[in-house]
């Protein structure tokens, strides 16, 4: 903001300021103390935008040459209309402003969404019923659950050496249900923590419909690869756990967050590193750390493909 001039007459100051406003030049006016020998104050005119100073100075010279010209008197009416229009626009803007309450980012805190909560409850209940795979002699319900929910009826597998035996008998639920069984309290705890985190995020961001599809396809991709691959390639039909599905959720979120930065979530780089190290350790270790490595790989790949598909 820069000082332009001082004008002793209030009507003339108002007329000149109004005229500048019609030209789109914004001003600031201050009342100055009376000069020596006078009793009336003067009006100091400042230009708000310094790049308009040359234009304002030219208009000042025209004004000083003929301050009573009709264009200055008529400018007052036009300036009032401009000011009123701006006031109306400001009122409309204020009406359009809505109060926005703070909400947590998707997946952070709050209640567990229904499908994720149901999965956690189901896994915990089945873990207790089956005694985490170590079914005691008197636990008939646990024995039935282990027999009917694993990828293959293990007795038939031992007899036929065909990992797809039960699927060929039409027991297609077995491609999903191994996810609900777990082989120990620590196994269950780690998987439930991961499911609570990634599942909650996915269900809230994508909705229960798309989330259900991601869960089902991740389970199918993980379990078919783990159950049907030869043992020399880390395959075995004797596996349990929802970790393949969890890796599917990770793959989905990781790919989509990269391809669609506006999707509502973000994975820090250390999340990728940690997951990669865990997968690599499983494949490189003797005995695979007792992990269903192909289920992890199959779930991760399936989730990543779904993330790619739904990011288009």
Image (cartoon, grey):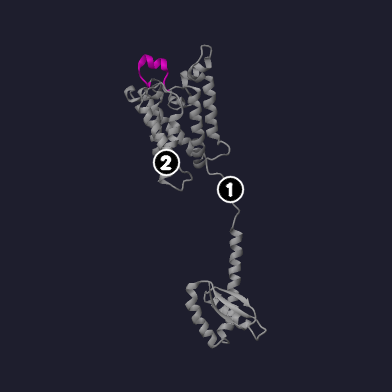
Tell which of 128 and 214 is nearer to you: 128
Above or below, 234 against 9 in this view is above
Q: Which residue is mark 2?
A: 269
Closer-to-camera residue (107/157): 107
Snapshot quadrant of residue 153: top left
* Residue 179 percent location from the top left of the image: 46, 27
Q: Which element carries disc 1, helix, strand or loop?
A: loop
- Residue 311: x, y in percent? 41, 44
At label 2, counting other C-alpha atoms closer than 10 Å, the crowd grade (few under 14, some 14-19, many 20 or more) is: few
Q: Position of residue 287 (x, y in %)?
A: 37, 22
Disc 2 to disc 1, how far (Cα)? 27 Å
Numbered disc in front, either 2 or 1: 2
When asked about the image quadrant of residue 223, the answer is top left
Q: Secondary structure at mark 2?
A: helix
The reply to whether the magenta stretch includes residue 96 is: no
What segment carries the magenta color? 151-164
Residue 155 included in the magenta stretch of the image: yes
Q: Quadrant of residue 267?
A: top left
* Residue 310, visible in the rendered structure: no
Q: Which residue is mark 1?
A: 102
Left or right for 259, reference 100:
left
**Does label 2 or label 1 sit earlier along the sequence?**
1
| In-image side of 35 versus 214 (left or right) | right
- The vertical placement of 292 against 6, above or below, is above
Residue 242: mark in rendering? none
Q: Outermost residue toward the left? A: 232
Residue 12: % across, % down:
60, 83
Nearer to me, 121 or 151: 121
Q: Is residue 163 left or right of residue 59?
A: left
User: Is any part of residue 266 visible from this angle?
Assistant: yes
Q: Is residue 60 above or below residue 300?
A: below
């Amino acid at each position: 903001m820069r000082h332009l001039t001082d004008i002793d007459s209030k009507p003339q100051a108002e007329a000149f300021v109004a005229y500048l406003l019609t030209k789109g030049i914004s001003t600031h006016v201050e009342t100055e103390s009376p000069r020596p020998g006078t009793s009336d104050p003067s009006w100091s005119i400042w230009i708000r935008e310094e790049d308009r100073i040359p234009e304002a100075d030219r208009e000042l010279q025209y004004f000083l040459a003929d301050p009573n010209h009709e264009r200055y008197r008529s400018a007052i009416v036009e300036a009032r209309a401009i000011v009123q229009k701006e006031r109306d626009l400001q009122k409309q803007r204020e009406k359009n402003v809505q109060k926005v309450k703070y909400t947590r980012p998707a997946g952070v805190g709050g209640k567990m969404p229904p499908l994720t909560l149901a999965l956690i409850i189901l896994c915990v209940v089945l873990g207790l019923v089956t005694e985490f795979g170590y079914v005691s002699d008197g636990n008939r319900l646990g024995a039935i659950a282990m027999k009917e929910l694993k990828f293959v009826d293990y007795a038939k597998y031992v007899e036929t050496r065909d990992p797809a035996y039960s699927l060929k008998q039409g027991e297609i639920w077995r491609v999903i249900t191994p996810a609900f069984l777990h082989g120990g309290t620590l196994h269950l705890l780690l998987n439930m923590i991961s499911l609570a985190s990634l599942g909650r995020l996915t269900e809230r961001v994508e909705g229960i419909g798309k989330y259900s599809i991601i869960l089902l396809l991740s389970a199918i991709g993980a379990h078919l690869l783990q159950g049907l691959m030869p043992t020399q390639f880390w395959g075995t039909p004797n596996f349990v756990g929802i970790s393949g599905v969890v890796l599917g959720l990770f793959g989905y979120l990781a790919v989509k967050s990269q391809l669609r930065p506006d999707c509502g979530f973000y994975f820090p780089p250390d999340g990728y590193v940690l997951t990669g190290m865990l997968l690599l350790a499983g494949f490189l270790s003797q005995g695979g750390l007792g992990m269903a490595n192909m289920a992890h790989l199959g779930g991760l790949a399936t989730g990543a493909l779904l993330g790619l598909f739904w990011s288009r």
